[in-house]
Amino acid sequence: MIPAAMPAFAAAKMLKMNAQAEAGIAQVLEAAQDNMKNVANLAAGVGQSLDISV
């Protein structure tokens, strides 16, 4: 027999896990945005002072 408090406990635990997952996703998205900014800055400066004369 499942105790009456068990479903409430499971629901609370799932909500906590969901909140932690959302926080993790937000961190990943923020890091991805920072990386894209770095790549964009890199792309803008690539080849500007490249001297290929012989």
Image (cartoon, helix red, strand yellow):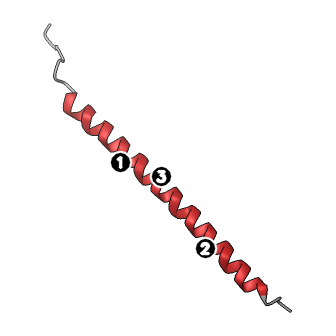
| Front residue of 22 and 50 | 22
Q: Residue furthest top?
A: 54
How many angstroms separate mark 3 from mark 1 (CA)?
A: 10 Å
How many angstroms separate mark 2 from mark 1 (CA)?
A: 27 Å
Cβ–Cβ under 8 Å for marks 3 and 2 = no
| Front residue of 25 and 53 | 25
How many angstroms separate mark 3 from mark 2 (CA)?
A: 19 Å
**If you read the primary sequence from the N terminus, does the residue marked by circle 2 or circle 1 appear first?**
2
Q: Is residue 2 left or right of residue 39?
A: right
Quarter of the image where the C terminus is located: top left
**If you read the primary sequence from the N terminus, does the residue marked by circle 3 or circle 2 appear first?**
2
CA neighbours of label 3 inside 10 A, class few (<14), some (14 to 19), many (20+): few
Name which residue type carries label 2.
Answer: Leu
Q: Residue 33 carries which label?
A: 1
Residue 43 lies, with reference to residue 24, above or below; the image says above
Q: In this view, does 4 lie to the left or right of 19?
A: right
Secondary structure beneath dot 1 equals helix
Quarter of the image for residue 48 reads: top left
> Image point 32% across, 37% down: which residue?
38
Tell me where residue 14 appears, x and y as whole percent: 64, 74
| Front residue of 13 and 44 | 13
Q: Which mark is residue 15?
A: 2
Q: Residue 27 carries which label?
A: 3
Residue 20 lies, with reference to residue 13, above or below; the image says above
